[in-house]
Amino acid sequence: MRRLLHLSLVILLLLTMAPVGTAEPLQQDVQLAIAINREAVGLPEFLQETGATGAGVVIAIIDTGVDPGHPDLSFTSDGRNKIIDWRDFTAEGRVDTGLVAFATGDLVRIGDEAYLLPPVRSTSGRYRYGFFREDQLDAGGNLGHDIDHDGRTGESFAVLLVDASAWDVYDTVFVDTDGDRSFADETPLRSFRESRRVGWFGDIESAAKTPFVVSHLDPGGAYVFLGFDGNGHGTHVAGIAAGFAGYEGGITGLAPGAQIMSLKALGSSGDGNWQDISAAVQYAAEQGADIISISVGGVVDISEEGSEESQLIARVAEEYGVLFVLAVGNGGPGVGSAVTPGVVTGSITVGAFVSPEMWRQQYGYQVPEPGLWSFSAVGPRKDGGPAPDIVAPGSALSTVPEWFAPRGQAWFEGTSMAVPHVAGAAALLLDASRRAGMQVDAAALVRALMQSADPVPGYHLVEQGYGLLNLWEAWR
């Protein structure tokens, strides 16, 4: 499959990648770091006026997946499930389960080995099985080929499908996550959309574990998709937009009341293609997403309004009324370096801003004036249209899987981080508008966000668009 896309991310803290032209972020107070970004975009004044949380708004995160076990991504600020859907559009988590096995007493033969059956038994007497292999993970991903973190790569885990409720309708999945040839000690999993159940590879009592879900399974038993974030990027984006900690020292995003669809269209390496993203876009719209967040950049210029990708976004935005928030990309600072889809009513493209307070608190640098990150891509687009439309904070402390960084928190920087600031802001505007009895569509949100932005002194229109996100002014 042709690789066309990658994450709009520059630095991952704790990876071996060396920063280019920047210092390593400082580990400082979590709440201060979050507060600086909030103040930069006018959030405190907005909250004081409206009290909005994003409740009732659904944000689709099309990315590497969202960690289903992170405590700051478990519930909304009003106690509902944070992640309401989890779907894998890549083949990274696919397990073919076309093989059939029959039970003998409490045992079932999987390949050449006998496994202890789970307490949930087959209605038809026919179990389906296959193997999830570590070597099917993207080789360049942050998990490598060791999803259970035991230091051994290339292991296989037996997967058993059970038709628990109806004859030959497979609805329950068991994974032998610890390799002890027993399904009796494993969590019975169903489609996450209907069950919200989570399983774990690795030691559940430690940080060395990978949570996963059943993305979807074939009722006929031919296959099942296991969903997980093997990169950390999608989890980071989700935390900025809509995390909710509910405890001191955790990550709370801009719209803690909003709910999330986790739509995995990029593998653990962070690479992907527009075919998978297109499928995720269509799914998100059909399932009722209000906002679609896409923090990716391309290696091929698809910025003109007539490109296939731009036409897809235009069609879906018009047909379903969904708002798209897109990263301008990290190809800057050269003129014409923006390669993301072209100008579309109902979409907004975002570049990366940095303030003196962010430089000081995050990096210990004294910088006198606000500005843009040098990596933030610059317009005009291929068709002469503007890019970006606005800018937002391009660095943030946010959620990542616990196996990635201590406490499940890390600094990332890139236009990827700017996108969820705008997605979260849009969710707050939708919530506040609905509370006020206002009928607001995606086009109205785009107009409000662009026309209220604060120009960043010393930067041209092609670099910053209308300027820095100002949520309070957008509401006014």
Image: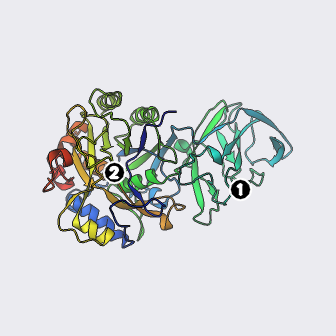
Kindly identify which numbered label has been placed on residue 465.
none
Residue 456 screen position, x and y as percent: 16, 55
Residue 166 screen position, x and y as percent: 68, 33
Measure how far apart labels 2 and 1 are at the Cα level. Answer: 36 Å
Tell me if label 2 and label 1 are in contact, CB under 8 Å: no
Q: Earlier in the sequence, mark 2 or mark 1?
A: 1
Q: Is residue 444 above or below residue 83?
A: above
Residue 414 screen position, x and y as percent: 34, 53
Reading the image, the residue beneath label 1 is 178
Residue at image position (34%, 40%) is: 290
Residue at image position (20%, 48%) is: 463
Give the colour scheme shown: rainbow
Task: Name the residue type under label 1.
Answer: Asp
In the rendered structure, the answer to whether residue 73 lies left or right of residue 51 reads right
Residue 143 screen position, x and y as percent: 56, 54
Kindly identify which numbered label has been placed on residue 420.
2
